[in-house]
Amino acid sequence: PETVTISYYGEGDAPKIEARAKAIPLFEEATGIKVDVQAYNITELFEIIEVQIAAGEANVDVIDVDSPLVHAYHSRGYLIPLEEYFTEEEKKQFTEKALEAASVDGTLVAPPIDNSSQILYYNKDLLDLAGLEYPSADPADRITWEEVVDMAQKVMDAAEADGQEGVWGLTFEQISRPYQMLCLPLSLGGDDIGEDTSTVDGIWNTEPWYQAAQWYYDIHNTWNIAPRGDDQFTIRDLFASGKLAIMLAGNWMPGNLALADVTCNWGYAAHPYFEGGKAVTATGCWNIGVASTSKNPEAAAEFVKFMTIGEGNDFWHEDVKSLSARTAVLEEEAESPEFQEFPDSIQLLAADESVNTSVIRPLMVGYSEYQDVFTACWEDIRNGGDPVETIDTYTAELNSLLAKYAE
């Protein structure tokens, strides 16, 4: 019979490319199904999915799906529900929150390929230069954002006195994106979306959001400890080259650093919180689904199972260094001596945070609009926009965009 070839549009981080290069040949050998991988950075992937599937391009079979977009893609008819391909026992392999984000009204749409949490990474040499103690990796002894600012300022002063140029104190890996930024207003007691998931009036334009936005403005414009103009890829390079003291990033970062030309001596700590507020950490999966444009949905579903509960997921977890979305893997790692040692011990902190302090991004049909407007809002604040006026302006804009989803 003619060989079946499925196309896979996936996110293109280097560790993910490495994992696919190991896993896919095994799948092809075992099944006879060929997989054509098209890898893109996260922004390009979102754009291509919107264009290709909305246009009905029949060459798209499997796509990576950011977990908060599962509802949006399902409502637009971009994905084929996968209930018939996964048994109840197979679905129970996933953690509760991962399965929740992968489903719409109890129907499995795009199973998780991994999960995530956030870690505070720091450059030991820069903190040593400033005579600072390393922040704790114990969640019970996590530092505050106020303490992080103080550390960042002292590092930059010490680096300048030492004749080092271009050293920054603090930033976020996914700068201005809701994935990491939402934890700021939520730590201060704010909410992320209205109960009807189609309004942000009375949610964004509130005191916790104003306070978080002011802090974000200050680190870029008042205290000047965070760089402007960089994206998540150049920020990683800043940290890897020893030019960034403190970075909030995903628990997958050791995988990226292992493939980079890392010159810094780094450590890690628990996610900060605001003084007087609560600890909140972002969690979220990369999911994988069968596109509605697929002419080979059964072959595509077989590949999805291989990459989520099959051997392909083992390679993914090993190379990407992400948090597993499978309960059994998390339990095994908790007992493994390997995961007691640096840097794999990061995964135990990530797993603890995912159980005790994690929040998922809003599960809503209009998440694409939510993410775009949120990012534009926080980028304006980052670049000098008045925090209160900017929040108010974008609250009205997003509320107008979400009105079409109101029941």
Image (cartoon, rainbow, N blue to C red):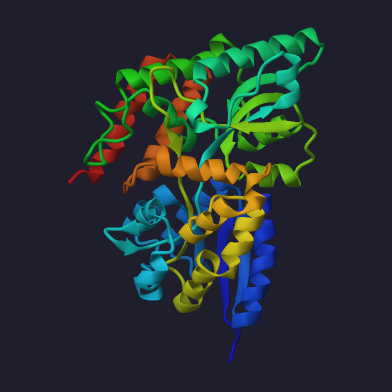
Compared to 100, does 399 lie above or below?
above
In which quarter of the view is residue 263 placed?
top right
- Label tally: 0
**Residue 13: where, in percent of width, then height?**
64, 49
**Residue 36: where, in percent of width, then height?**
62, 69
Q: Residue at x 36, y 67 (%)?
A: 81
- Left or right of 35? Residue 214 is left
Is residue 391 or residue 166 the one in the foreground?
166
Q: Residue at x 36, y 26 (%)?
A: 394
**Residue 406: where, in percent of width, then height?**
21, 43
In which quarter of the view is residue 251 placed?
top right
Is residue 130 or residue 307 the one in the foreground?
130
On the rendered image, what quadrant is the N terminus found in? bottom right
Camera sees residue 227: no
Compared to 301, does 64 lie above or below?
above
Q: Residue at x 39, y 43 (%)?
A: 360
Camera sees residue 274: yes
**Residue 393: where, in percent of width, then height?**
34, 22
In which quarter of the view is residue 372 placed?
top left
